[in-house]
Amino acid sequence: MSEPMSPDRSNRRAERQGKAPIQGAEGRVGDIVPTKALRSIATLFRVLAGLLVLLMAAQVSMGLTSTVAISPGVLLGEAIRLVIFAALLWAAGDLANLYVKSQADTRAMRILLARLTAIASRIETTAPSGSAATLPDERLQDEHLE
């Protein structure tokens, strides 16, 4: 069971709506890439693969029921050729989807890097000068070296 949100927590959530999580680290236009076209091409390749399989089934059924005799070897060869082309089209659709997913990971890494850079520059500008300017981890490492 979930516990009800406190009014203070719901107010903070409402304040955050519409604001960037970290000021000064908005997403760049280059980080947002439309993928609708690639997804529709992947769907088109899969539909074409399905149509080729249906064409193969129709060709085999017509070859077996036709009044004109056809060599079983030729019929089998044509069926195998159509199945191979259908498999290649299906694989091309899978590769297009894989490309879309890998680009999403790349965009997420770019955004994360931009946010970390904004945090680092904010820490750098607000840190006092001198020995206190080093981050706590660096001070601990210096103490262990001495």
Image (spheres, grey):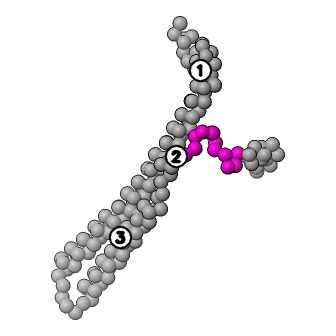
| Secondary structure state at the residue bearing disc 3 | helix
Indicate yes or no whether the magenta region holds residue 57: no
**Residue linked to disc 1:** 135
| Secondary structure state at the residue bearing disc 2 | loop
Please tell me whether residue 133 is drawn above or below residue 107 in the rendered image.
above
**Residue linked to disc 3:** 49
The residue at the far bottom in this view is 67
Near-viewer residue (49 or 133):
133
Query: Tag on residue 28?
Result: 2
The residue at the far top in this view is 146
The range drawn in magenta is 16-28
Please tell me whether residue 95 is drawn above or below residue 114 in the rendered image.
below
Identity, as a three-letter code, of the amino acid under mark 3 = Ala
Q: Nearer the viewer, mark 1 or mark 3?
A: 1
Question: Which residue occupies 59% across, 20% down?
Answer: 135
Identity, as a three-letter code, of the amino acid under mark 2 = Arg
| Secondary structure state at the residue bearing disc 1 | loop
Give the CA distance from mark 1 to mark 3. Answer: 58 Å
On screen, residue 95 versus residue 62, left or right, reads: right
Q: Position of residue 138 (x, y in %)?
A: 55, 18
Q: Position of residue 67 (x, y in %)?
A: 22, 93
